[in-house]
Structure formats: C-alpha cells, structure tokens
Image (tube, rainbow, N blue to C red):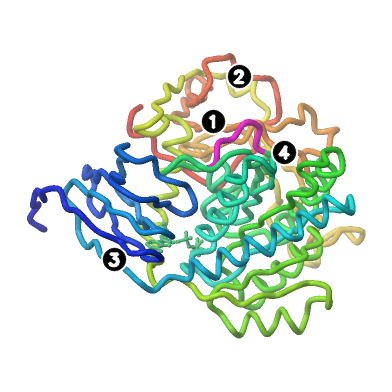
Amino acid sequence: ESVEVQIEDQEFTLESDNELRFEVENKNETVVLELKTGLAEIFGTELVKGKSYTFYFGAKIAVFTWQGCTLKLRGKKGISYISKETPMMFYLNCHASLEQLRVKSEKENIRGPVTMVVGPTDVGKSTLCRILLNYSARMNALGRRPIYVDLDPGQGQISIPGTVGAVMVERPAEIGECFSQAAPLVYHFGHTNMSINTTLYNTLISRMAEVIHQRMDENPRINCSGIIINTCGWVKGKGYQHLTHIALAFEVDVILVLDQERLYNELVRDMPGFVKVVLLPKSGGVVERSNKFRSESREASIREYFYGSPRNVLHPHTCEVRFSDIKVYRIGAPPIPNTLMPLDMQKTDLETKLEPVTPGLNMMHHMLALSFSTSVEEDVVRTSVAGFVCVTNVDISRQMLTLLSPQPKPLPETIYLLSDVQFMDSNS
Ligand code: ATP
C-alpha cells in the first residue's frame, strides 16, 4: 500500500527546449497544472497562461517549452522531472517539411503529403501524430485541414477499441482530450488484435483509403493538407505486411519510423523510391504501458463513449429490444476444414462473410456497432458505422436484450454488428 502524501504547490522553471514530465499514477488522484509565465505546450497544444488544467488517472504528460517558462503543479503525484533531452526539434523539422509539401501541393493542385507513423509499441507514435496535427492546426491563417487516420484497433482512438477510424482536424486538440469529432469515419473491425482477421483488416484499410481519397478530391483544402496515419506497434512478420499494405492503399509519401533502425531499413528496401522514409528518435519520456494498463484504458475509452469524461459528462440511455426485432450479424465465419470448403470458396471469403447471429447469452456485455447499411443486400462489411450500443442484459425467458446507448433516441432499424470487444457497465 502506498502512502498518499498531499504535496503542496510545486513550481518548476524550464529553460528553452526543456520539458516537464509527470504522470497521474493513482485512481482518484488529480494533478492540476498552471502556466505562470512564458509559453508552453502539451503534445503540440498551447497552454493558456493562468488557466488550470486538471489531469486524471493514467495521464502521462510532457509540458514542453520552446521559449522557457515557469509552471505550477498541484496535487499528489509520483515522479515529476525536467528533461533537457527531447526529440522535439526533430519533430518540428518534420512538421516544417510537411508544411513545404502542403505549400507545393497548393501551388500545383495535387494531393498533399500522406504521412504514416510507424514503430514498435510504446515509442510515442500516437504522440507524434498528435504533435504534427496540432502544429498544422495551429497555423490558422493557412486553414489546414489534415485528416487523422488511426489504424490501431487495439485502442481505437477515433472511436472505441475494435474499430479503425478517421477524423478531419480543424483545430488543435484540447489539453487531455482527443481531437474534436464532428463526423468521424469509423469502421467496425470487431477485434482489438488485428491478427484475428487480417483479411478483414486489409479490406477495411483499402476501403477507408478509397473513401478518404475521394473526400480529398472533393475538397481542395483537405486535399493539400494531407493525411497523418497512426499505425499499430506490430511491425514484425505479418504486422510488417500490414504496414506495406497501408502504405500502398493510402499512397503514402512519407513514412516516419520511430526508434527502430531495422524497420527503417526494411522500409527503405521495400518502398518505391519516391516514398521518403525518415528515422526519428523516440522521446525518453514515452512511458511503457503494461497489458493491464492497456486493457484498463480500453475499458476507460468505452466508458467515456457512454458516460463522457470529467470535462464533459454524458448521460447514456437504456432500452430493451425483442430478440426478434434486432438484426445482428458478425463479420467472419468460423473456419471450416479444407475438405468441407466449397470449391469456389477461399479462406479469405470466409473472413469477410456476413453471418447472422441469434441473440442470446453469447451477446452479454458485447459491443454492437450500428451500421450505416440497413440491409444485407448492401456492402455491409465495407460500410462505416454510425455508433455503438452495449448489451447489458440478456433475458432469455422474455426474449429481450437490454442495450446501453449514448442516444435517447429510439434505436434505428439497421444492421447491428457484433464485436468481440466487451464492456462491463458498472452503472447498470
Ligand atoms: P502504442 O503503439 O503502444 O499504442 P505509441 O507508440 O503510440 O504506443 P504513445 O501512445 O504516443 O505511444 O505514448 C505512450 C505514452 O507515453 C502515452 O501515455 C503518452 O502520453 C506518453 N508520452 C509520450 N511522450 C511523452 C513524453 N515526452 N513525456 C512523458 N510522457 C510521454
């Protein structure tokens, strides 16, 4: 048992190019940060002087300053320290290069830079994406509108775990929050581990790239701002093949490789010459996360989908539907032995097959995605989803499902896609 100590306000003076790193390590603990003098930013979002920023359990933060600043930190907390060694100058240079490509694309009326960030787990891929997106969004006068694509279904930053998604970035993210999402483009994958259905994963990637390229073609501002793609930390074997598939599908121009020289060399070898592959150092501040932490943050992300965050509380609704009134499907049929496989069928066909699922106890605590397709006649697998509900109870005798929904509206009559991802709603 750790002894909780109430720590008084602490002041930190940072010289230029330094950062203050801290974590909120315990549940129910909060840390409040204030910028007293100078200028500072958190992962590319500028702090407002004199404003209090509250951080909650799990936050792992670096407050960086280009100019020097003083900061005040209040609350109980574990380690907090100033680092003079950061890779921020490299990251800023990346931003400057991307900005040059955007200017060029504006002039020549061609697609702006499509950038993919890759590297093993816990090297700061998401953080680098966030910094680059924030920097471009901060250039108000230029009206940049880059698209952020998150292809890691393990975390599903754009939506919930088990999905891949994209969002247009119009303004810097609020401190401690994700990028604001007017109309995210979300695809249901249904698993947090992409190795479970690689055919489906690649199918979704190709479809997403198609849809995003189309949107870019229709909007010059988005087009010249380009795309920033976050990938997952699986970079060996099949994981590497996924990376090359993503690069091909999205027609990537720039690949930023964090930390791993081997991966860098492989990509230099395998990518066509016009793709610029850049090796970047990782920040010493990036915190390794345990499997336990990852599964807790998955749960927290679904909880936030329904209940909001301390900054923005939401009130979800519960409703009941009859088994007979809901159409639930799963993507991917269980494998059949080769000898039983119809001659005209491939293993990959099975992996993207839409299979009806009869409601029952097997759905308990599972997430269901609401497809934009309303009938199986449509291309359900390659259609994006509108939102999610969670099955919080299955009543066999009454043949009823209880669903938790973020919306008070009656549930639409649509296709529901069963996810492997589960959520235990402690409030119901
Ligand atoms: P994965 O692929 O495993 O999901 P990742 O490579 O995308 O991880 P991030 O999510 O960017 O890694 O970073 C891991 C954690 O480290 C995050 O919680 C992030 O807030 C924190 N972090 C990143 N940079 C710093 C830093 N300079 N100082 C302190 N914490 C940091």
Q: Nearer the viewer, mark 4 or mark 1?
A: 4
The location of residue 375, given as percent across then percent down, is 79, 28
Along the line of sight, the residue nearer the viewer: 206 or 57: 57
Residue beneath disc 1: 389
Asked if the residue at tag 4 contacts the one at tag 2, i.e. Cβ–Cβ closer than 8 Å, the answer is no
Residue beneath disc 4: 384
Classify residue 424 by image quadrant.
top left
Q: Is residue 416 left or right of residue 210?
A: left
Q: Tag 3 or tag 4, which sits nearer the N-term?
A: 3
Q: Residues within 10 Å of mark 3 (few under 14, many from 20)?
A: some
Q: Quarter of the image for the C terminus: give it.
A: top left
Asked if the residue at tag 3 contacts the one at tag 4, i.e. Cβ–Cβ closer than 8 Å, the answer is no
Q: Secondary structure at mark 1?
A: strand
Question: In this picture, which residue range is highlighted in magenta?
Answer: 179-184
The location of residue 304, given as percent across then percent down, is 43, 36
Along the line of sight, the residue nearer the viewer: 408 or 31: 31
The location of residue 220, given as percent across then percent down, is 83, 41
Asked if the residue at tag 2 contacts the one at tag 1, i.e. Cβ–Cβ closer than 8 Å, the answer is yes
Q: Amino acid at mark 3?
A: Ile
Q: Residues within 10 Å of mark 2 (few under 14, many from 20)?
A: some
Q: Amino acid at mark 4?
A: Ser
Q: Main secondary structure of the magenta part?
A: loop
Q: Tag 3 or tag 2, which sits nearer the N-term?
A: 3
Q: Nearer the viewer, mark 2 or mark 3?
A: 3
Q: Is residue 73 left or right of residue 171?
A: left
